[in-house]
Amino acid sequence: MFNDFVAPSLYPAAPEIFLLFMACVILLVDLGVKSPRRTLTFVLTQLTLLGCAAITLLTSNTEVVYTFSGMFVDDMMADLLKLLVYGAVMLALFYSREYIQDRQAIPKGEYFVLALLATLGMLVMISANHFLTLYLGLEMMSLSLYAMVALNRESAISTEAAMKYFILGALASGLLLYGMSMIYGATGSLEITEVGERLYTYSVDKSVLVFGIVFLVAGLAFKLGVVPFHMWVPDVYHGAPTSVTLFIAAAPKLAAFAIVMRLLVSGLITQAADWQGMLIVLSVLSMGIGNLVAIAQTNIKRMLAYSAISHMGFMLLGIVTGVVGGDARFALNAYSSAMFYVVTYVLTTLAGFGLIMMLTRAGFESDELDDFKGLNKRSPWFAAMMMFVMLSMAGIPFFVGFFAKFSVLQAVVAAGYYWLAVAAVLFSLVGAFYYLRVVKLMYFDEPKIQEPIEGPLFIKVLVSANGLAVAALGLFPQFLMSLCAYALMRSLT
Amino acid sequence: MEMQKLYLLVALAPLFGAAVAGLLCRVIPRWLGHTVTIAGVAVSFIGSVLVFQDVMAGNTFNGPVYTWMTTGDYSFHVGFLIDSLTATMMLVVTFVSLMVHIYTIGYMHEDPGYNRFFSYISLFTFSMLMLVMSNNFMQLFFGWEAVGLVSYLLIGFWYTRPTAIFANMKAFLVNRVGDFGFILGIGLVLAHFGSLDYATVFAKAPEFANTTINIWGAADWSLMTVVCICLFIGAMGKSAQVPLHVWLPDSMEGPTPISALIHAATMVTAGIFMVSRMSPLFEMSTTALSFVLVIGAITALFMGFLGIIQNDIKRVVAYSTLSQLGYMTVALGASAYSVAVFHLMTHAFFKALLFLGAGSVIIGMHHDQDMRNMGGLRKYMPITWITSLLGSLALIGTPFFAGFYSKDSIIEAVAASHIPGAGFAYFAVLAGVFVTAFYSFRMYFLVFHGEERFGKAHHDEHTGDHDDEEVSHDHHHGLAPGQKPHESPWVVTLPLVLLAIPSVLIGYVAIEPLLYGGYFEGVIHIDKVAHPVMEELAHEFHGPLAMVAHAFRTAPFWLALSGVVVAWFFYMKRPDIPAAIQRRFSGLNAILENKYFFDKINETVFAGGARLLGRGLWRGGDVAVIDGFIVNGSAKVVGWMAAVVRYFQTGYVYHYAFTMIIGLLLLLTLWVRV
Amino acid sequence: MLENYFPILMFILVGLAIGVLPVLMGWLLAPSRPDSEKLSPYECGFEAFEDARMKFDVRYYLIAIIFILFDLEIAFLFPWATVFKDIVASEPMRFFGFIEVAIFLTIILVGDAYAWAKGALDWE
């Protein structure tokens, strides 16, 4: 019965397997760690991520490799995104260390294990080539994140945020699954590349297919947090412990980008005319509402949540412009600009939340805009770093955010959507206001408290390096840009 | 590959010095500040010599060293184009810069901004190198703006002097006018050629020979003419051509070393370099060349006149620089690009020498710059005296000196040119020779010979339109009665001597290979049919010695000689004559005193008009429309919308879910067609 | 064709009989002396009719979650068990089929060990 069975190659999934193994080990090891700082757990976690990075690097090649009967794919885009995910998670955990240390209610060991499992989910999402694999990764990540949001059990606001996140997330999962089943119904395959091929060769029931695509886009939009599937974003960013907000704001965006690429570009590129139209609506709504509502916020975490909504909307513009009237000449340029955008956004947002966390102390959350008043007088260096982050997010030349916006806009113009480019620029201008307001608060207002920012030297160096990278990549963006373009060129067929 | 690293080293060594001296200017001691910057520039100079040798051996380079970014079809590079033109410029820039660095040790030794100054001039050297080594318009523009920025910073180096601030603001604004034209030109190039790389643009240029574009109304303009004139407007700003010259005399508010380096030898010649580099474009438009020629001729002659009546030693040299830049521009207009670059090179040496000599005099006079307070300095400052004499002889075009070869070549080139405006230009450059000789030796005699007028009551009333009384905190002003001037320290005189050598010799050595030896083959492109000037010159050229022999039979020599004699007669023999002339021709004198009213016109018409317009726009446009309606109005609307949209974020999870479902239904109704 | 469904028909009939017969027999045979306590439906010790949003002891959830965990484990093992013979019989699958389930069980065990060590299995 099973005589024609061939054991799947495990190499392409080596990082995931290693991560799963280490997550189990760390879960058990942590049971024996009694120190309140959980140094061993922390070190093991970071080493695991380093090990994953090493494995990913060692097993990477320029070919596209499928395994597990085509359920799992390992290509350059996956490798690059995975490496960036490790980096983002490692940075997030470094920044979180002191923060969770100061908060008794947060269980320390579980924090790291959940972070690792969420990372595993992201990796599976990035490498998914099958609806079920994708869903598996998505749920793995989401469940871990729900738990992480609720980790601070003494905080009512965290619990509320976790509850909302969970319920809405379940709803979104349902939408996604429903969309997948519709597409399965239309094409008869669950394998993403196979779906793409069948759409080329067979004629399918168009209305069922589009029905599925709508649900799929809705599910993806939830994960990206774009309007009108964004309602969870501000509450979760605000309610979650800042370290968890940082975690959610960074690496999962990379994974979300990956599943958008897998589902819409690899699988449904023939239906681009349909989903591009939907994404345009979502994108314009996100840029508009995200930027407008951010202005009214007084809490910097909430502000950054709306900022994230608008940024994801902007990023979608790059995905929208890949195919124009059946002409895919601009595809590579458009998708790599979107990838560059999301990567630089993650980098910038890490620095931003890293700095917010440096301002917090035991028993004091520094998440109101007023807490940034006069930061320049307290710590001129970190005020400068925060200014870099804000200017980059606002898209001021010559910070990396400018080039991200510039390359996306360039793709939009090349695709001929002039009105879209104009709208994007206008909304960015609106957005510049609230970023610059933070700069104004830091430099022109009097501080409420005088003492400079405290923190371990290593973290200070790390945050500084992160902040400087935002500036340096703005001066020399080419390396990262061409890296994104190369990875996509090797992965898209 | 090895050479590429060398190119990078040449460009980046001064940047390193500038970064160290600039970022740590409050921390490191003075000796370290000047050591690190001088070392950087010295490395750069040695590298330039090596590059020059390599280019002489026939190795040129054109390629990107770093791709800054690629977006769509365009990619922006940092790249180098190393050929004979670049190598020449690199040598000139690094050599003069090195001399000025050394000189500065002596000149600025009591200034509190010592390290800052070294940082700026090193940064300038880096920017200038980036400009000349560029292989594309973007980097050219970067270098162009960077040297402008450093120039701005250095003119206002003594930022507590209101005159210095006025001068640097003026330089900044006037250069913006030029840069506007320049960036329009670059934009046109990008729009029509689809590339910013020189090589690509030059290769494509012939395709656009007959392209016309419509700018205004019904008139169609040749694309190449528009591009070239736009680019040349940039050159007019940077190289101070009439009417954008007004900033250069005022830039003398900066310390003397930068007057020598930036406002005489290198930065102001960037325009000349740029036009030479763009010769394949300019050759395609005789109209643009005529424009260049006429502008240059006006500058050469009329700015020379102004040099005659100046009493501030630096301003005389400044007007002389303007006039000489005019000469170079004339050469460009006559399609004698190599001659322009040749004059650029000789001028860099002797004008830097004259400026540094003037600076040395200023040190000796304890920062008194008024020539009416000088006289007879020959005895007290022998090295300064002899080197300044050599510089002046080179400037007026004495046979065998550097200036002779380059300037005579320009005059002959104009004589051979037949494009519209050449007749006027020939007259202007010829008359300019007399004027140059006259003001140069007027200065020479007033400073170094005649009655010793220092140590007496000052002529405090300065020549310029600014009151110089608010002199900076650290500057003594003039010699006390009975005090004698003294020779400057060796760090000051050494650069003078080192600069005097090329000022005398370089013309004799370089003319034959540079102009007629195919040195710029393939670098400077000349349309031999339309503009056969260089061929005619080559036909008449029989070696540097023969050129001298020939010179005694031509007008320029005798004009120069008569200029010297008249100057001697007026200022040594009969000092009463100039005063009498001044009285007799008071109207003319008033015109010259007011510099043809350029500043007045600029201040009343442009600055005043701009202010009037500004006030009108402020009152009507800004306060009412923009502030009231657009800014505050839109801010209000945005704020209101933000407040409204915010209410959707109720916090109830069923509202959130409801929103999602509404969104889903929206997408379904919009896209699903059953 | 239709006779293939005969076992299902039998299954339905037997199922119905087992469900209906005891109730029928109780109704026929038992003495009927109702009081209010006897008439209220049996609901694990809770009041049948009260506010649905009542407080549960959080330990119920813990137990429930662990129960679901093991329940699912069994659900996954069933299909494996049905083809176990074939797996053992086939040469390429024999090792792989075993290891895969072993890994699955190990992960469950790790979770179990964790829950145990954290005291999730202790009621007090």
Image: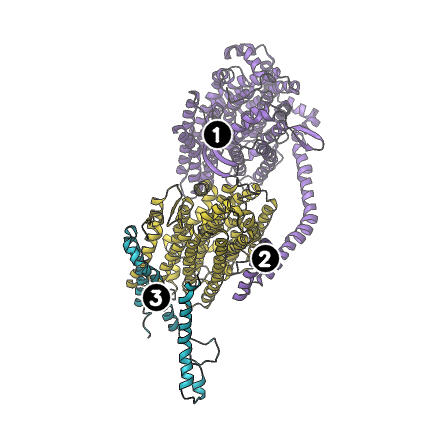
Chain colours: A yellow, B purple, C cyan
At mark 2, the secondary structure is helix
Residue that mark 2 sits on: B666
Q: Check disc 1 and give the amino acid type.
A: Met
Please give left or right for residue A470 compared with residue B152 in the image.
Answer: left
**Same chain, labels 2 and 3:** no
In the rendered image, is residue B613 in sight?
yes
First in sequence: mark 2 vs mark 1: 1
Q: Between residue B475 and residue A98, name the one nearer to us.
A: A98
x and y percentages locating residue B610 in the rendered image: 67, 41
Q: Residues within 10 Å of mark 3 (few under 14, many from 20)?
A: some
**Mark 2 or mark 3, whichever is nearer to me:** 3
Q: Residues within 10 Å of mark 2 (few under 14, many from 20)?
A: few
Residue that mark 3 sits on: C70
**Same chain, labels 2 and 1:** yes
Q: Check disc 3 and give the amino acid type.
A: Phe
In the image, residue B565 sits, relative to residue B4, either above or below, namely above
x and y percentages locating residue B466 in the rendered image: 61, 36
Q: CA distance from mark 2 to mark 1?
A: 58 Å
Q: Residues within 10 Å of mark 1 (few under 14, many from 20)?
A: many
Q: CA distance from mark 3 to mark 1?
A: 73 Å
In the rendered image, is residue B272 in sight?
no
Q: Residue at x 44, y 89 (%)?
A: C35
Residue that mark 1 sits on: B133
Q: Check disc 2 and give the amino acid type.
A: Leu
x and y percentages locating residue C10 in the rendered image: 40, 70
Q: Residue at x 65, y 55 (%)?
A: B633
Quarter location, residue B280: top right
x and y percentages locating residue B157 in the rendered image: 52, 38
The label on residue A462 is none
